[in-house]
């Protein structure tokens, strides 16, 4: 997650990582419906945490077998 503050606005960039292409489809949902729902439900919580209105930018990416890769886990802070 990256947070950028510019011109009085706070932008939060989030990358959701999945292991398989099929999981990416599930997270995005039909015409983006699930990703939209994730944004709608998480935005108020992030705004409460940061104390300001935010622009939330969500992306889904695939990292094959990241849960079994020590290097990938290290990059993610595990």
Image: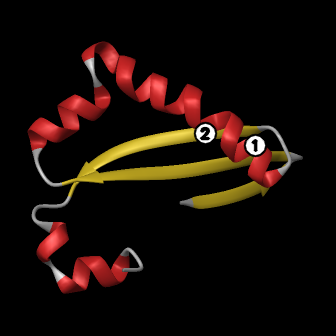
At label 1, counting other C-alpha atoms closer than 10 Å, the crowd grade (few under 14, some 14-19, many 20 or more) is some
The image's mark for residue 34 is none
Q: Position of residue 28 (x, y in %)?
A: 30, 29
The image's mark for residue 47 is 1
Numbered disc 2: secondary structure: strand
Residue under the image location 25 percent in, 77 percent down:
72
Q: Position of residue 56 (x, y in %)?
A: 61, 39
Q: Above or below — where is 65 with respect to 77?
A: above
Residue under the image location 10 percent in, 48 percent down:
20
Q: Mark 1 or mark 2: which comes first in sequence?
A: 1
Residue under the image location 11 percent in, 61 percent down:
64
Q: Above or below — where is 74 with respect to 15?
A: below
Residue designated by label 2: 56
At label 2, counting other C-alpha atoms closer than 10 Å, the crowd grade (few under 14, some 14-19, many 20 or more) is some
Total marks drawn?
2
- Alpha carbons under labels 1 and 2: distance apart: 10 Å
Q: Position of residue 19 (x, y in %)?
A: 15, 54
Q: Above or below — where is 15 with respect to 31?
A: below
In contact (CB < 8 Å): disc 1 and disc 2: no
Q: Above or below — where is 57 with respect to 37?
A: below
Task: Please tell me whether mark 1 or mark 2 is closer to you in this view.
Answer: 1
Residue 29 vs residue 41: left or right?
A: left
Give the quarter of the figure containing the C terminus.
Answer: bottom left
Residue 67 vs residue 33: left or right?
A: left
Q: In the picture, residue 5 is in which quadrant?
A: bottom right
Residue 2 vs residue 24: left or right?
A: right
């Amino acid at each position: 997650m990256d947070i950028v503050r510019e011109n009085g606005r706070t932008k939060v960039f989030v990358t959701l990582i999945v292991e398989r292409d099929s999981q990416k489809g599930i997270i995005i949902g039909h015409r983006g419906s699930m990703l939209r729902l994730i944004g709608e439900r998480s935005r108020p919580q992030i705004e409460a945490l940061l104390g300001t209105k935010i622009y939330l930018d969500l992306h889904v990416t695939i990292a094959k077998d990241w849960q079994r890769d020590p290097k990938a886990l290290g990059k993610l802070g595990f």
